[in-house]
Image (spheres, grey):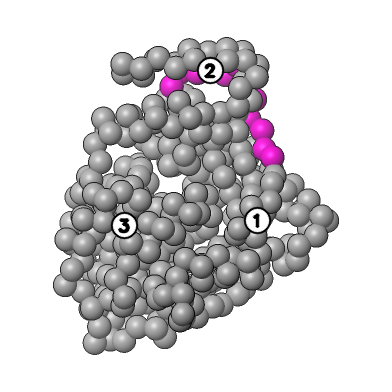
């Protein structure tokens, strides 16, 4: 097994991007899981799994969905975007290999810490594996993945574990449209509101408030960017607010640092002043309304191939969908 990580971005470029985001007072979620802070997220997930059964703990949840859309004579590349440690797909990969599917695996993440966890977690999974340290919205990533996968019959770009719901939706789906070839698939899972009501939305709010603001290990990973920047703990409070994102039909939860003291941050050659009462956005999380989300993807010229839903909680269902690019008339 080749455990080498192919770096499309450098540490210098990552720091430069962090400065750019900080000037806009918005820290993209990818900065939460860099370096040693990647482990804290999964410590929180492991702690919570003692009380909540995640949908992917059903070994057949992913396998039975994707297996019917590929054939054994096809040479397939599965490219996991923002892969994390790949615990969601581990048994699916094992079963696909056991069934003699010709599949190679590519793991992509903006965090080398996450890629290190993936390498450790997948050491006993057979088959060719490659690990790519990159940001999928960039031209450099598109060139890298095209170079490494140009001989495959089909590529499947996978977002597992709700990951795409935390990204800017227009940037993400515009980037994907320009990344995919006509025979490629996009394979995603995400959370959907069982009904749109104030009561159910409040229950969702309380669930995500507890996990992201009060779970000890998750809180550690949320604070990674501020620790990296040496911002004092007594200068801010981590908060959460909810708005409706109309164009995706989402309940959009925004996590942010509210500053009650002014701070000055120096990083490389830049000095940044964050004043009292300013807000520094940390990340976003979405719970979708399915009909609105389908319409959003149709307007981006994505064609639905298949869908599957599984009950997760009373107020939330988990969906899997498979899409390919088409045009507005498909």
Q: Is residue 121 above or below residue 230?
A: below
Q: How many marks?
A: 3
Residue 223 position, x and y percent, is 52, 30
Say which residue appears at 43% left-offset and 37% top-offset: 31
**Mark 3 highlights which residue?**
107
From the image, state whether disc 1 or disc 3 is nearer to you.
1
**How packed is label 2: few (under 14 Cα within 10 Å), some, or many (20 or more)?**
some
Q: Position of residue 148 (x, y in %)?
A: 18, 62
In the picture, measured across the screen, residue 137 lies left or right of residue 100, that is right
In the rendered image, which residue does mark 2 sit on? 274
Q: Earlier in the sequence, mark 3 or mark 2?
A: 3
Q: Is residue 190 left or right of residue 145?
A: right
Residue on which the image places disc 1 = 246
Mark pair 1, 2: CA separation: 30 Å
Q: Quadrant of residue 144?
A: bottom left
Nearer to the camera, 173 or 188: 173
Q: CA distance from mark 1 to mark 3?
A: 32 Å
Query: Which mark sits nearer the N-terminus, 1 or 3?
Result: 3
Instruction: Answer whether residue 238 is magenta in the image.
Output: yes
User: Residue 90 appears at what percent x and percent y?
Assistant: 39, 65
Residue 167 is one of the magenta-drawn residues: no
Mark 1 is surrounded, within 10 Å at the Cα level, by few (under 14), some (14 to 19) or many (20 or more) other residues, namely few
Name the residue at 50% across, 54% down.
169
């Amino acid at each position: 097994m080749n455990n080498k990580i192919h770096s499309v971005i450098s540490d210098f470029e990552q720091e430069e991007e962090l400065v750019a985001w900080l000037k806009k007072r918005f820290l993209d979620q990818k900065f939460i899981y860099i370096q040693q802070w990647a482990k804290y997220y999964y410590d929180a997930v492991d702690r919570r799994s003692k009380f909540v059964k995640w949908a992917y703990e059903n070994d057949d949840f992913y396998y039975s969905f994707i297996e019917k859309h590929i054939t054994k004579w096809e040479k397939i590349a599965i490219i996991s975007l923002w892969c994390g440690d790949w615990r969601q797909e581990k048994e699916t990969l094992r079963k696909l290999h056991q069934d003699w599917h010709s599949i190679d695996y590519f793991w992509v993440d903006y965090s080398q810490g996450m890629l290190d966890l993936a390498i450790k977690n997948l050491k006993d999974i057979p088959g060719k594996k490659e690990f790519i340290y990159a940001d999928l919205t960039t031209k450099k990533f598109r060139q890298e993945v095209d170079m490494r996968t140009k001989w495959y019959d089909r590529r499947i770009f996978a977002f597992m574990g709700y990951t795409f719901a935390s990204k800017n939706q227009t940037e993400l789906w515009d980037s994907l449209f320009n990344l995919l070839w006509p025979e490629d698939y996009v394979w995603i899972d995400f959370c959907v509101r069982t009904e749109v009501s104030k009561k159910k939305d409040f229950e969702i709010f309380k669930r995500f408030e507890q996990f992201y603001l009060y779970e000890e290990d998750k809180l550690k990973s949320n604070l990674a960017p501020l620790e990296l920047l040496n911002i004092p703990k007594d200068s801010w409070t981590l908060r959460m607010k909810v708005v409706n994102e109309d164009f995706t039909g989402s309940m959009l939860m925004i996590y942010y640092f509210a500053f009650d003291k002014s701070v000055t941050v120096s990083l490389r050659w830049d000095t940044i002043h964050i004043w009292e009462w300013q807000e520094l956005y940390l990340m976003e999380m979405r719970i979708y309304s399915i009909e609105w989300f389908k319409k959003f993807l149709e307007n981006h010229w994505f064609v639905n191939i298949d869908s599957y839903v599984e009950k997760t909680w009373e107020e939330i269902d988990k969906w899997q969908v498979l899409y390919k690019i088409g045009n507005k008339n498909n």
